[in-house]
Image: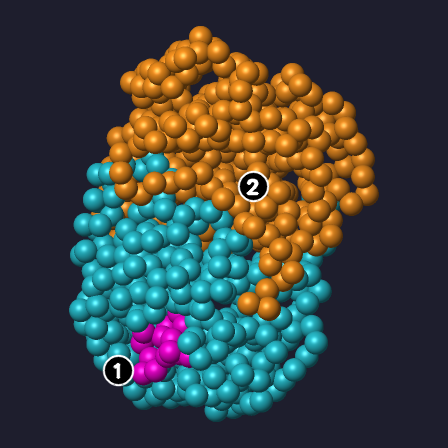
Chain colours: A orange, B cyan
Amino acid sequence: MSFVRPEIAAMSGYTPGEQPQGGKFIKLNTNENPYPPSAAVRRAIEETLDRGLTKYPDPHATAFRLRASEVLGVPPDWILCGNGSDDILTIVTRAFVGQGQRLRLPYPSYVLYRTLAQLQGAEWEEVHFRSDWTLDDAFAAPRDDLRLAFLPNPNSPSGTTIPPERVLELAERLPCPLLVDEAYADFADQNCLNLVRENEKILVSRTMSKSYSLAGLRFGFLVAQPQVIEQLNKVKDSYNCDALAIAGATAAIDDQAWLAENRGKILATRQRLTEGMRSLGFDAIPSQANFVWCTRADQPVEALYQRLKEQRILVRYMNYPCWGDGLRITVGTEDQIEALLATLKLLLAP
Amino acid sequence: MSFVRPEIAAMSGYTPGEQPQGGKFIKLNTNENPYPPSAAVRRAIEETLDRGLTKYPDPHATAFRLRASEVLGVPPDWILCGNGSDDILTIVTRAFVGQGQRLRLPYPSYVLYRTLAQLQGAEWEEVHFRSDWTLDDAFAAPRDDLRLAFLPNPNSPSGTTIPPERVLELAERLPCPLLVDEAYADFADQNCLNLVRENEKILVSRTMSKSYSLAGLRFGFLVAQPQVIEQLNKVKDSYNCDALAIAGATAAIDDQAWLAENRGKILATRQRLTEGMRSLGFDAIPSQANFVWCTRADQPVEALYQRLKEQRILVRYMNYPCWGDGLRITVGTEDQIEALLATLKLLLAP
């Protein structure tokens, strides 16, 4: 197809984690929550089905924004809803970054940010994390063509966080908006939501996929100052969230008791996974997310990933040039993690 | 917000038709289908709820593509699914049109195409329909920076079509891909699906919002040659369709008996609406869509739109510079259309 833009033709495209549609896998590769969502989600979806699907949905997902406003303590017009947080990241990139301009991201982090730059015909530059997963001032260095910075916090694959006071410092120095991607923030001790009031350059994105167990529903949102939201509204598709997703997400965020209980279970199992992997000879840094990044000084781990897959256990194998490889393992149920640890123990036995 | 791209800051943004979320309106303004979708849709959605929403959906909506392939008679890898056909139009625009390049559309037609150009920082040019709603060769004229042409067929607001043989002729002359937006094609006598095999430059988009009564679900798709689909796959969000939408859309397209029956009802009421409006002194051109474009030589119709709205009947008022104003009226149920005609008769009484 010779008509496609050269930037697109040159791309290989973003490859999401494997999503086997059949077969029985213990699926610990794409950071889905292992527990079903709040029962209120299904009730809300069925009530919406009762009202019917023939009409277009509310273009601004007002019901969600009103409820999220109360839960998060920000006004409704500080919230923009999206078809998953991927949609939010796309909207933000398109709003700020033109062709030939530049975005910045830390390395290693979420590969999709590069894809978003490529799609815009934009450049990107990666600022390496320090070996302790902190970020030095290079991340905030001025540069004429810089239009947007992405900071996943907690980061993937590391599960580490940059503390809010440091994020504010970086944002204040940056010559452009800073998107703090808080996909995993519900599993962390701290988050940057309160920083949005401090500086209009700080935008915080969230997803319902992980902490609310709704990856199948596609719902994410952004918190930013209203003059920012007003501009981003022009970029989004008019009806980017469907009626069932709006209803389900609204019910989910309304059930904070469910969230607290689910979070407690995930954090306990995360601790077990971290200790279990360490006892098997992995380096596993303390995680603030629903996954743990596990590396080995003594051997590459790709073969382990393959052998786990043969045993129908899927984890995410990642190999970062200049950084090394590792397994990013989602916190599953207690039983799933025990099965993983037992299988790994056998695979590693001499 | 001074960081937003100047093209975005300068935009007013696309305004979708009014979507009142409360109150009792006879809603004939956004071409929704007045009848509920096939009962199979709800069953499929509930089965998906039984399986759960915790996992990411199939990134390629394989179930839908397999079923649509059989119904439409094209191979599955000729189909790309989207979060409504708006998503499809966005993907296509981003794939072909870079900043400063140009897209072409007929005038008057769907205003969103301009918005898509603006978001890309691209130019657009409008080729006026002839007064009989045909298109002359200017629509296919060569131009160096032209990268994409949009042809809504049937067109909105007119409800008229360009015959497939003429579309093929235009596509062959055009120096760029031609997106035939067939949002309303299920209500027409002919469509351009078979042209996709003839020329890789022809792309046909469809939506489940209108003819399948699923505007609330957000599902659309594109039919194009596989080398085109392969490129467009790089541009879409990985998980652009959610699990419930995939299941619902698959069940809907599977129920062709429902479609045939629904289409029959809409076409009969369209005839009644057309004749009724003519008898009230409107010019109503024969429509191939699920709406009728009604104009008056004797007076502007904005006041009628307003007075209908006061009576809780919503129609779409449109005013095209150099073309005049009119009411675009969606084909509702028989009862809704009788109520509209009776109300208009009173409003127009001397």
Q: Mark 1 points at which residue?
A: B272
Q: Residues within 10 Å of mark 1 (few under 14, many from 20)?
A: some
**Does the magenta-highlighted stretch encompass residue B186?**
yes
Q: Name the residue under label 2.
A: A112
Q: Which residue is drawn at 60% across and 59% down?
A: A9
Q: Distance between the residues labelled 1 and 2?
A: 52 Å
Q: Residue at x 30, y 86 (%)?
A: B275
Tell me the chain of label 1: B
Give the percent coordinates (x, y) of residue A60. Answer: 47, 48
Q: Is residue B112 left or right of residue A255?
A: right
Q: Is B112 in front, or is A60? A: B112
Q: Is residue A270 above or below residue B83?
A: above
Bounds of the magenta segment: B182-195
Q: In which quarter of the image is residue A265?
A: top left
Question: What kind of residue is marked 2?
Answer: Leu
Q: Residue A107 carries which label?
A: none
Give the percent coordinates (x, y) of residue A283. Answer: 53, 14
Question: Can residue B311 be seen from the camera position used here?
Answer: no
